[in-house]
Image: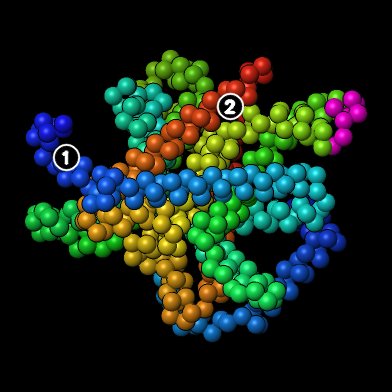
Amino acid sequence: MSRAFSRFADEVFVPHRLAMIAVALGIVIWAALSMRWHWIPRYSDLALQGIWRTLWLLGLSCLIGFALAVPLGLAQAAGPRFLAVPARAFCTAIRGTPLLLQLWLIYFGLGSLFPQFPWIRESELWPYLRQAWPYALLTLSLSFAGYEGEIMRGAFKSVPGGQLEAARSMGMSRFAILRRIWLPQALQRALPTLGGETVLQMKATPLVATITVIDIYAVASRVRQDTFIIYEPLLLLALVYMVIAGLIALAFKLLERRFNRGMVM
Amino acid sequence: MFDWLFALWPGLETTANLLSLQPPGWGGNLLRGAWASLQIAAGAFALGLLIGTFGALGKLYGGPVTRDLLAVYTTVVRAVPELILILILYYAGTDLLNQVLRAMGQRPVEISGVMAGIAVLGVVQGAYATEVLRGAIQSVPRGQLEAARAFGMGAVQTFRRITFPAMLPLALPGLSNLWLIATKDTALLAIVGFSELTLETRQAAGSTRAYFTFFLAAGAIYLTMTLVSGRIFGWIEARYRRGQVAQ
């Protein structure tokens, strides 16, 4: 611990860095004193709800997307042709078009299609399908699956063939090989990229505000429209996203350390 | 000419009419939007390359303050959603320009959407390009640079003759990825009301209620752009890798 601290101190307590930190602090103090922040107490509840919505949209879409990405990657890396070609086409289509377009296609397209079928309107799911968030979650999940499927394809392919042959010669079934040998090693290889992709996914979440999901970005836009204050909500919003990005990076660092335990690097 | 096809597939005729290039159809609007998107993407990519080159050189050879400032720039841009950067830079940029103009006794101007889009996306692209180019420059073997110095080449000459050609094949995959991001990020300008492909599509879809037709058509246009540019980048990469040892 003390060694880590002294290394940290070595990096920070350099004259030019101290000067830069002083300047940054000066800017922060100036911003706190002379910019307009009186709107914060009025909107704080809404902002917390918005942050929470952003976070769960991000977490859930990453989980669902990743669950879809594993079969997508596996189909492309080792699947038969009739599975590999559609999986590849899906990944290309997702990665080749803007997320905003996908979001609007699903929200406006499906949203205008569903009410035409009486049985959908009478079904149990209808109260949910009338809201915007299921469409946002679906689009974000599909998008994450498309990008991640490509990464998992590379990760599955990069596991040495000898490992799989050894597992086969030990008499493991194909599913056991996947669960015990192939997937863990592929995951370990994909993990550093996965962290970056999760940050990219976080950066994509504010788009859901365009289909009326009230995430933290939508709250900031509302502050701007209500009070005509432009910069302050945007700067605070940028800060919130930076903190979330930092937390994601930290979480993946810890995860990687855990995953790499006992591995010969 | 296509009558037999329309007889086989009744929906096709309305689709063809909606997408036709003449005014009752919206095809012309879509293509105009696509052209605007391409222009912004190309401009932003070029600006990003310019910023990225200086950023990478600054990060590698600059003084400690330059390096730290560049680190702040790349970290912030890569952690904050593009949409928010676009809004901040758009408002702040217009404000700043008008204040400068007012100080000089000029009248405030309205910034054109294309220029604002290029500037904002270029700043975002610059951060990513800095990292791509820095990695590529760093992986040029040291011996080559030492050999260049031994031949008496100056810093600029070394960069032009040795570093740049040697790093280009290493940087191209990252740069091609950046170009794809640039074409897709132009869609974000739809939210600030600039009529590029995505916004034109939404207007067309909104006024005809044919959401699937138009969004799928726009998707096809974007996909064509990315696939064609992927081919072009692959071709350039193969060309620059000629005569290099295969890795």
* Span of residues in magenta: B148-155
Which picture quadrant has residue B226?
top left
Residue B88, x across and y down, in percent = 55, 66
Residue A75, x across and y down, in percent = 36, 28
- Looking at the image, is mark 1 or mark 2 earlier in the sequence? 1
Label 1: state its secondary structure.
helix
Residue at 82% across, 25% down:
B143
Give the residue number, with chain letter if any, for mark 1: B12
Magenta span contains residue A205 = no
Q: Is residue A69 above or below residue A49?
A: above
Identify the residue at the far top of this view.
A169
Residue at 42% across, 53% down:
B196
The disc placed on residue A7 is none
Q: Nearer the viewer, residue A6 or A32?
A: A32
The amino acid beneath tag 1 is: Leu
Which picture quadrant has residue A94?
top left
The mark lying in front, picked from 1 and 2, is: 1
The disc placed on residue B237 is 2
Residue A178, x across and y down, in percent = 40, 28
Let me know if residue B5 appears in the view. Answer: yes
Which picture quadrant has residue A77?
top left
Residue at 47% across, 45% down:
B38
